Amino acid sequence: MAVGETMRASRSTGRRRDGPCSICVIVWAATAMLFALAGPSLPALARSGIVANDAMTAAAPDLPLARRLFPNAAAISRIERRDTNPPVFAAIGPAGLVGLIASTWEIAGSLGYSSRPIDILVGISPQARITGAILVQHNEPILTLGISSADIEKYVQGFAGYDLTKPAVQVFEDTGDLPPIIAGATVSTGVIRDAILRTARTAALGHGFIRSSSSSIDRVTFASRSWQALVEDGSLVHAALTFRDAAQRLGPIANPLPEGDGRFIELWVAVIDPPIIGQNLLGRQAYTRAVGSQAAGDAAIVVASSGLHSHRGTNYRQTGVFDRIELIQDDRTIKFQKDDFLRIDRLALDQAPSFKEISVFRVPANTGFDPAKPFRVEIAAERDRTDGTTANLNLPVAYALPQKYILPATDVSAQIATERPMWMSAWERKPLTIVFTVLMIACVGASFFIQEFFVRRPNLWLYGRYGFLLVTLVGLGWVAKGQLSVVQVAAFLLALVNGFRWETFLMEPVIFMLWGFVALGLLFWGRGAYCGWLCPFGALQELLNEAAKRIGIMQIEVPFAIQERLWAIKYTLFVVILGLSFYSMEQALVLAEVEPFKTAISFKFMRAWPFVLFVVLVLAAGLFIERFYCRYLCPLGAALAIPAKLKLFDWLHRRPQCGRECRFCETQCTVGAIDGLGRINPNECILCLRCQVIMNDAERCIALKRRAARTGGAGSTGQVKTLRAGE
C-alpha cells in the first residue's frame, strides 16, 4: 500500500518514463555539429602562433620578423645572437645596433594558466622603448577559443612605444600607456603584460639601455677565470672551522667531536650574478638555469661546503626554510626558502676543490638585499651538552663584491627591482569579489554543519536553496566569473608534471578559492558541495527546470538501468580530455567545448551561434530531465566524482523502509542518484538535500506516516506540507 501511495505521488508530479535516449541523440548531434563548425578554425589558430606543446625552446627571430619588430628602422642586415645575461638577439643595421630582441620564455620563464610556456618576442630600442611584440607560442585555454587571433595580436602589438624608464605599473591596472586587459581573458592577458614588461626591462637594464639610480651589477660581461684568480680578486671568499676549534666553542657535549685539525666545516661564498663569477663556477648550462628565471632585482649567491657539518641540514624539507644558514646585511636578516634553492652537484672549474654540498640560493628583490653592498653569511651549529642544555656556535663569512663588477650609479629609476608579484596585484584588485566568494563558500559549509536544522524546515530549504542558486548564477557566475572547468583540472595535472607553481593558480582569486573549497569539500562531503550549490551552470539548469515544472512541462523519469549506462558518457569525456591534454592541449581544449560553461557563464551567450545553439539544446533537454547535463555529459562532475570516493563523512540519512516500502525519494532526486534499493550513489549525489527534507516531512514520508498512525497522531505538529507536489 505504501509503495502504491508513493508511485501515485510520483505520477502526480508530471513525470513519465520515456524519451531519454531521443534527447541524448539530439544533444550529441548538436555537439558533433559544434565541433564540425569549430574544426575549420584550427588552422587559423595555428597561424596565430600556437605551436606544439612540447616546443619548449625559445623562439629565434629571422630577418622578416625582426623588421616587423622594428618597423621604423631604415634597414636590418643581420641578426646576431648574444649569449650574455640576459641572452638576447641583436638587430644590426648599416649604422650599427638597431635594437635588441628578447624572448619572454628565455628571460622571464613566462608560464600561462595552462602551466605551459608563453613566448613573445619583444623589440627594444637603445632609447629603452618597446618597438614591437609578437606572440609566437602559447597554450592558453582562454586564448584558444572564444577570443579571435586578431584580438590577441592587437593586444600584443599595443605595447609598441612603451617607455621602459617609466615607473612600473600593476599588472592588472588600466593605464593609457598600455593596452587594456581583455575582458574574459584577465589572467592570460595579465600574464602576457607581465611577461613583456618584465622581459623588456630586464634586457634593457642588463644591456645598459636603463641604468639604476643605485649602483648595479655588471650582468653582461664574461671572461674566463680560474679558481685561483677568483679567490685572489675576492670574488670567492671562505672561512673554516676545525674539530678542535669547534669543540672549544661548543664545550662539553653529549657526542664529542673527533679530535684533531680535521674540518668541522669549510665554507665558500660568492655572488654569482656577474657572469665572470657565476658562469665560470657553474658552467654555462647550470648558470643559465640558476639565473635565467630571476625576476628584476633578484640576486643569487652560491654556498659550497665540506666537512662534517652540513650548511643545509634536513629540516628545510619539512619546514621550507633553511634553519642553519642566514644572510645578514646591515640590520636585515634573510632566511633562505626551499623554493629559492637549487642544488648543484659539482663546480665547472677543474681547479675547484671537491665539496660535500653546493647550493645556489636566490635572494628575491622584496627582501631588500643589495648584492653590491657588503654582507655576511652565517652558518649555525647546535649540539646537546652533557648537562642537558644546547650549545651553539656561528661561523660568519664576510663578503664584499669586488668593485670591478659594480657599475657606477646613474639617474634612472630603480623601481624595476622592486616589482611586486603578479598574483598579489590580482588579489588586491578584487577585494569585494573575494569577500563575496568567501561568504558564499562559508554559507555552503555552514549549511552542511547545521543540516538537521535546515532539512526539518521545508520552507527554509525551498526558498533558501533557490535563492542561493540564483545568487550563484548571477553573482558568482555572471559577475564574479566563478565557473570551474575541466580545463583547470587538466591544467593542474599538467602543472604537476611540468613544474608546479602556486603563482600560476593564485592569479585568479575566485577560481583559486573555489578550488580550495572543492578540495576540502571532496574530503568532507564529496562532489556535491560544489556541483549542487556553487556551480553557476548547474544553478541555471535547476532554476530553468523549476520554472518548467511550474508551467506544467512534463518531466521525463529515466529508468535507473538506462541512467547507469548514460553516466558512462561523462566519465569517458573526462578521461579523453585529460589524456588528450598530455598530447595536445589545443585539441583537448576543442573537445572541452562540450562544456557549455564558457558560452553560458563566462561570455553570457555572446559567442558564435554554434556555441549558443549547443547550450540552448542542452538547457532545453534540462527542461524535461532535471540537471540533464550534470547527469550525463559533465566531464567536470566526473573529475570530481572520482576523488570523492575518499570522503570522510556521510551525513545523508536513510530509513530501513527506503527502497523497500517507499521509493518516493528515488523519484524526486534532482540527479537520479538514488537506486531502486534506496541507496544514494555518492558519485552522482549533488547534496541538494531534497531527500533529507522528504524523509523529515511527516506528510510525505511513508515511515513517518505509519509511525503517526500507530501512535494515533496526525504527524508532527510543527510540520506542514509546504513543498509543491513533485518536490
Image: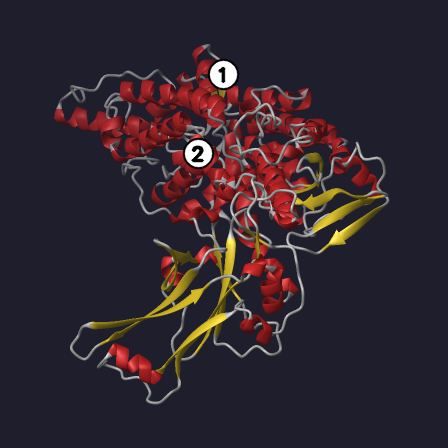
For the point 23% across and 17% down, which residue is it? 720
Name the residue beneath numbered marker 2: 427
Question: Callout 2, which amino acid?
Answer: Trp
Image quadrant containing the N terminus: top left
Up the image or down, 535 lies above or below 375; here it is: above
Image coordinates of residue 312 in percent, x first then y, are 41, 67
Image coordinates of residue 278 in percent, x first then y, are 58, 63
Secondary structure under the numbered disc 1 in the rendered image: loop
Q: Is residue 713 visible?
A: yes
Secondary structure under the numbered disc 2 in the rendered image: helix
Name the residue beneath numbered marker 1: 554
Horizontal side of 236 relative to 527 (left or right) equals: right
Residue furthest to the top? 551
| Classed neighbour count for the residue bearing mark 1: other residues with Cα under 10 Å, few (<14), some (14–19), many (≥20) | some
Q: Nearer the viewer, mark 1 or mark 2?
A: 2
For the point 62% across and 49% down, which residue is it? 206
For the point 31% across and 37% down, which residue is it? 652
Image coordinates of residue 349 in percent, x first then y, are 61, 74
Image quadrant containing the C terminus: top left
Mark 1 or 2, nearer chain start: 2
| Classed neighbour count for the residue bearing mark 2: other residues with Cα under 10 Å, few (<14), some (14–19), many (≥20) | some
Up the image or down, 169 lies above or below 227; here it is: above
Horizontal side of 422 relative to 689 (left or right) equals: right
